[in-house]
Amino acid sequence: MKSLFNKYIDTYKGIAREIWFLSIVTFINRAGAMVIPFLSLYLINQKGFTLPQVGWIMTFYGFGSLVGNLIGGKLTDIIGYYKTIVLSLFTGGLGFIGIQFLDTFYSVCFGMFFLMIAVDIYRPAIFVAADAYSINNNVTRNIGLIRLAINLGFSIGPVIGGILIARVSYSSIFWVDGITCILASFLLIALLKPKKKKNEEMPVIQVKEGISPYRNPAFLLFFLVMIINAIAFIQYFSTVPIYYKQIHGLSEDTIGSILFLNGIMIVFLEMPLIAWVERLGMSKITATILGIVFLALSFIILNFSSLFGVLIIGMVLMTIGEMIGSPFSNALALKMAPKGRKGSYMGLYSMSFSISHIIGHNAGMNAIHYFDFDLTWYGMFFILIVAAIIIMYLPNLMKKQQL
């Protein structure tokens, strides 16, 4: 047991102090991220919107995320990841507090749009920071640690959110989410700003090498696969909670507990899993494919039985897919990005999630409205298998471009 513990600790060695600081800030930020898992339930139960209306609100959510990632990538290349992250945390916090006071369909749509612009300029910046503080090519483990912080916070957030909703009100989660975002921005300033005098943030690179991500066929194919993957993945934050509630009759605090399983597995297993996959010599592309396959299995199994245990198995399969696929797909995107264009490449990579929000929530809501949950889960399984097949062509394209 002691040897196993020591091996677990070894997976964290050699990570720069700045990445630990960023991870602490990210944990505090994500610990307050209790709005997103309950957003669809909130819009239905508290605001009285229909499923198609919720789908359109989530589409505006996606458009805001798309614009936010685009702006975030450009800002990261222009002003650096540090200022971009601070700006996102502070303005996003204000947005979470304010959006609860919007009541009409159109005001909520546009409020969600501007909120997600503020929130998602964070994404490209944090990926570039992981690369900037890489030591001995450990960028995948840097990403893994930041993801661990995200998921540790996210594992706690839904549990607290479910309790707050059940015992206080839905409004309380918006206040907690907003305040923690603002606190995280101040903590980042306190932890990292003094370091800039002694160890300056990576300078903004003016000379750009290689080609734009929008003209890179290999990266665009990879981008397409990430969109498909993300469309399915985000169902766990919109339609799947509704499935838990309407089909299995689960309460919000029980739903939060199932989501807690996802986070706690990532906290304890993702870093050792990354280290194990790297020791196997598995390529980043193969790991990404494996992650997609596990996610596909997590949907198809929901149709096997109505037992509660199947929900747990589905969450475990999804989490395994996320733990393998996400860090290695992030690292693959960074590997494909030439010097001076990392912000733009990671901005486009992050935009795959934004586009999935535009398409996925709306498509998922309408699918369950018109066809039912079972056919929707079959559909998710099918598009993921298609994505896994498509990405198999990526190595040939990369070889032609000598990436």
Image: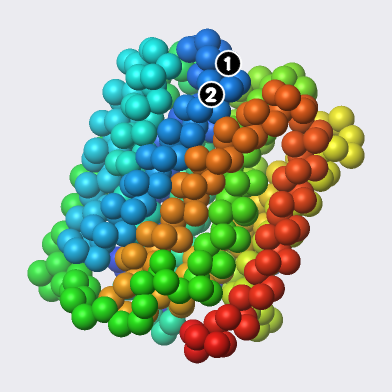
Residue located beneath label 2 in the image? 54
Whole-Å distance between the Cαs marked 2 and 1?
Answer: 6 Å
Between 143 and 54, which is closer to the camera in this rendering? 54
Element marked by disc 1: loop
Residue lying furthest left in this view? 197
Badge 2 amino acid: Val
Image position, residue 355 (x, y; %): 49, 47
Badge 1 amino acid: Thr
Quarter assignment of residue 197: bottom left
Say if mark 2 contacts mark 1, CB within 8 Å.
Answer: yes
Q: Residues within 10 Å of mark 1 (few under 14, many from 20)?
A: some
Quarter assignment of residue 124: bottom left
The correct choice, above or below, for 148 with respect to 313 in the image is below
Image position, residue 52 (x, y; %): 58, 22
Q: Horizontal placement of 397 versus 207: left or right?
A: right
Q: Residues within 10 Å of mark 2 (few under 14, many from 20)?
A: many
Between 244 and 358, which is closer to the camera in this rendering? 358
Quadrant where the N terminus is found in the figure:
bottom right
Q: In percent of the image, x 26 and y 31: which residue is there?
A: 94
